[in-house]
Amino acid sequence: MSIIKSPLLFAGSQGEKYLYALYDSGANLSCIHPDALENLEIPVSLGRTRMIGTAAEGHYIEVSQRVSLDFYMDDVLLSDEFLVIPGLSEEAIIGSATMQKWRIKLDFEHDIAIVDPKVAKMQLI
């Protein structure tokens, strides 16, 4: 089993910084560790606390905050919502919904994530 993890530049309303992001096709949503948000972005309330299931059977995590962040892959600007997860094992996780949204492909043979700059153009149609 291969793990793809890389440093990405994240940008928020408070600044920008590089974080190591794990690409996890088993996680449907993208997440970020609360400590990684320092000097980056201020979390906002989800309104209602959500119970998010983990890989461990019957184990759930309470989530009450989220952030919207820009991040860059190969100088391509991408953006999405990240759930703020206390105790997250990674600085950031790019989940399958974000990968599908931006058509990010995982190349396990070369241990890289790939984004096509043509696909990632933001457009209002």
Image (cartoon, rainbow, N blue to C red):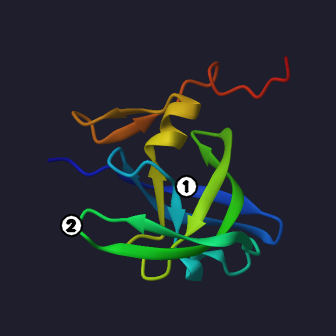
Vertical relation: 81 (above or below) 39: above
Q: Which residue is found at the position 72% from the left and 59% from the top?
A: 11
- As shown in the figure, which amino acid type bears the numbered disc 1? Leu
Which label was assigned to residue 8?
Answer: 1
**Compared with residue 87, is residue 118 higher up or lower down, i.e. above or below?**
above
Image quadrant where one finds the C terminus: top right
Rendered residue at 76%/63% (across/down): 12
Residue 94 % position (x, y)? 48, 51
Q: Nearer the viewer, residue 16 or 12?
A: 12
Residue at disc 1, secondary structure: strand
Q: Which numbered tag is attached to residue 72?
A: none
Cα separation between marks 1 and 2: 31 Å
Name the residue: 65% across, 75% down.
37
Q: In this view, does 65 lie to the left or right of 44?
A: left
Specify which label sits upstream in the sequence, 1 or 2.
Answer: 1
Query: Which amino acid, mark 2?
Result: Glu
Picture coordinates of residue 3, whole percent (x, y): 26, 52
Q: In which quarter of the image is residue 109?
A: top left
Q: In which quarter of the image is residue 60?
A: bottom left
- Residue at horizontal 57 percent and vertical 83 percent from the top: 35
